[in-house]
Amino acid sequence: MIKAIVYKSNTGHTMEYAKMLSKKLDIPYFTINEAKNNLKNKEEIVYLGWVCATKISGLGKVRKKYDIKCCIAVGLYPEDKNYIKNIKDSNKLEDTLFYLRGGLDYTKLKGIKKKLLLMVSNEMEKENKPENKELIEIFKNGANFVAEENLEPILKFINKE
Ligand SMILES: Cc1cc2nc3c(=O)[nH]c(=O)nc-3n(C[C@H](O)[C@H](O)[C@H](O)COP(=O)(O)O)c2cc1C
């Protein structure tokens, strides 16, 4: 039985999804640190982590400690088969991976992470490839894709288990 949602968020989008899932499944949601005091080793969880350079942050730590029934990556890029495969390979994931689009909020980004993102954004703008039109716009203005209906396939999967 899934005991809790565990998550790692940098600017809040992953936390929003964790909160929504917690409400839908009627189980608590914890940051990785909070989970230490609230969960036992090997207990079943749903894990959500924000994507940083194709890595699902926090996953390494969490997979050693808990039994992840469902792993969810929260990123900015549009969902695409090759991109999801890339995330799965980067994170050595063989089981089902769910992907949710989070968002970009410059007001909450700081330090090196903000610099890195601005570098990617500048590069993309310079290249100006037609296939990157949407992303160039997002990098310029920010975006928020968090929506409850995005959780539907995940809820179906969990309720079937
Ligand atoms: C340094 C950095 C690297 C990122 N790398 C990726 C990436 O490889 N793929 C992706 O889809 N999004 C990437 N993003 C975007 C975040 O995953 C996205 O903004 C996400 O919604 C953040 O979730 P949070 O608000 O819970 O922190 C990156 C963001 C930052 C700051």
Image (cartoon, helix red, strand yellow):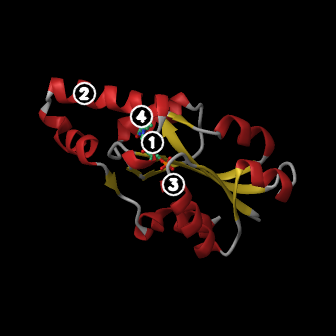
* Residue to which mark 3 is pinned: 12
Circle 2 sits on which residue?
A: 122
Cβ atoms under marks 4 and 1 closer than 8 Å: yes
N-terminal-most mark, 3 or 2:
3
Q: Quadrant of residue 128?
A: top left
Q: Which residue is drawn at the image coordinates 83% and 49% (left, top)? A: 42
Q: Which one is earlier in the sequence, the residue at label 1 or at label 2?
A: 1
Type of amino acid at the residue the image marks with label 4: Lys
Q: Of circles 1 and 3, which is in front?
A: 1
Q: Mark 4: is the Cβ under 8 angstroms from ligand 1?
A: yes
Q: Which residue is denoted by mark 1 in the rendering?
A: 109
Identify the residue under disc 4.
Answer: 114
State the quadrant of the N terminus.
bottom right
Alpha carbon separation for disc pair 1 and 3: 10 Å
Question: Disc 3 versus disc 4: distance between alpha carbons?
Answer: 15 Å
- The front one of 145 and 10 is 10
Residue at (35% x, 42% y) in the render: 77
Disc 2 within 8 angstroms of ligand 1 (CB): no
